[in-house]
Amino acid sequence: MPVGTRAEFCNDLVSKMAESRIVCIGEASHGSQEFYQLRADLTRALIADHGFVAVAVEADWPDAYRVNRFVRRLRSPDQQIDADPFGALAGFERFPAWMWRNTVVADFLAWLQSQNDLVSGGSAKTGFYGIDLYSLYRSIDVVIRYLEKIDPAAARRAKSRYACFDAFHEDPQHYGYAASAGVADSCEDQAVMQLVDLQRQAGDYARRDGRIPPDEYFFVEQNARLVKNAEEYYRTMYRGRDNSWNLRDTHMADTTDALLTHLYEVAGHAQIVLWAHNSHLGDARATDMARRGELNLGQLMRERHPGETFHLGFSTYDGTVLAADNWSEPPEIKTVNPGLEGSYERLFHEVLAQKPELRGSFWLPLQPRDTPRHLLAKAGPLLERAIGVIYRPRTERQSHYFRADLVNQFDAIIHVDRTTALQPLDSPGQQAADEEVPETFPSSI
């Protein structure tokens, strides 16, 4: 079936997706305009036509919550709502800022705020949340500022506990290396104690100050949990990629589950859309990741919520992509190599060459009852490409391909044969210097 406009794919694909409680929409790169646009269009339909109440993305919790305040017009005593999507996205300062500070996301947020303005009565407005774990120091600051407003004594305790991190000058990688090498004490106990203390006082805080919106405690508790998990993440970074990857994706799964529980308590129902890279949202058990001992968010969602998830992946044969050469370097428009022989990208390109009526793109349903699944399974596991925020065409086979069984990795796939580079809101020179580890480090996805 051809895709390209909402009218062409919405009815069939969205109706399949809407049957699930958790819809995972991936991307084959962090810098392709078509992937972002199609994902936004599908999500619009799920929200407007099927009542989905949250979009949770591969981004830091504090930065995304600023966006959440904008799209839901949420005010807190010390927070003003940003005037437009560009202001709401201002928190995404660090490399790779273009992942969220781009024209597609800005347009989607403007639409989402307008859509939420139509909600009346007791119906739930749709929120925007981050599920990643890189914002160690910013999350510490959020916890302390919240407690200063509501419980000064608890704020002093939090400052004392979190002071353990002060010696590392807001450089979590420095902390992780020092703690893992045994040259500095771990801050694990302090981070855990602060989370437990905050949870113990939850009921009292809810009664103490009615000016604080109901979501604010949940927002703060997730920041405290993030500090605990991020502390462990930075210590494990130096023990091997599989340890840190697994901890990161488990944190994203735990945050998603906490969000589902919170939304159900507040709204009485909870259908959620997840936005992340294919490598996070496709089932790791169907890829080389399993052989390396890695799991991912998509696998965990399937295991924890059997029969309640839908996983959509993307692929492309060639075109251009917005990506960097190395960490913290400005992004540039790069030419994407044609898909390799023996890859799904090449297979889909050859299909399109024989079917000009598809106009360069199509989607395939891959659930057990779907005929394309059985046809594609005959090809066996093939290579699959993953482009993150870094793209190195000269070493592409080693850097960007892995073997995958697509029919068990996703429930559907959208192939866009030629894609174009994502349009960022900022010029490359406006990319801010890193205060913490770059998002997607160390895998770039």
Image (spheres, rainbow, N blue to C red):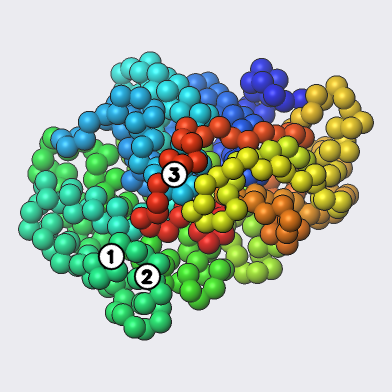
Secondary structure beneath dot 2 equals helix
Q: Quadrant of residue 260?
A: top left
Q: Residue at x 59, y 29 (%)?
A: 37
Q: Nearer the viewer, residue 19 or 328?
A: 328
Q: Residue 84 in the image: state x and y as whole percent.
A: 35, 24
First in sequence: mark 2 or mark 3? 2
Q: Position of residue 147 (x, y in %)?
A: 15, 51
Q: Amino acid at mark 1?
A: His
Q: Are marks 1 and 3 in contact (CB under 8 Å)?
A: no
Q: Which amino acid type is shown beneath numbered disc 2? A: His
> Residue 158 falls in which quadrant of the image?
bottom left
- Above/below status of 202 relative to 114: below
Q: Nearer the viewer, residue 33 or 131?
A: 33
Locate residue 76, reporting x and y percent: 20, 35
Left/right placement of residue 38 relative to residue 398 reads left
What kind of residue is marked 3? Gln
Of the two numbered discs 2 and 3 in the rendering, the one whose residue sits closer to the viewer? 3
Looking at the rendered structure, the secondary structure element under dot 1 is loop
Q: Are marks 1 and 2 in contact (CB under 8 Å)?
A: yes
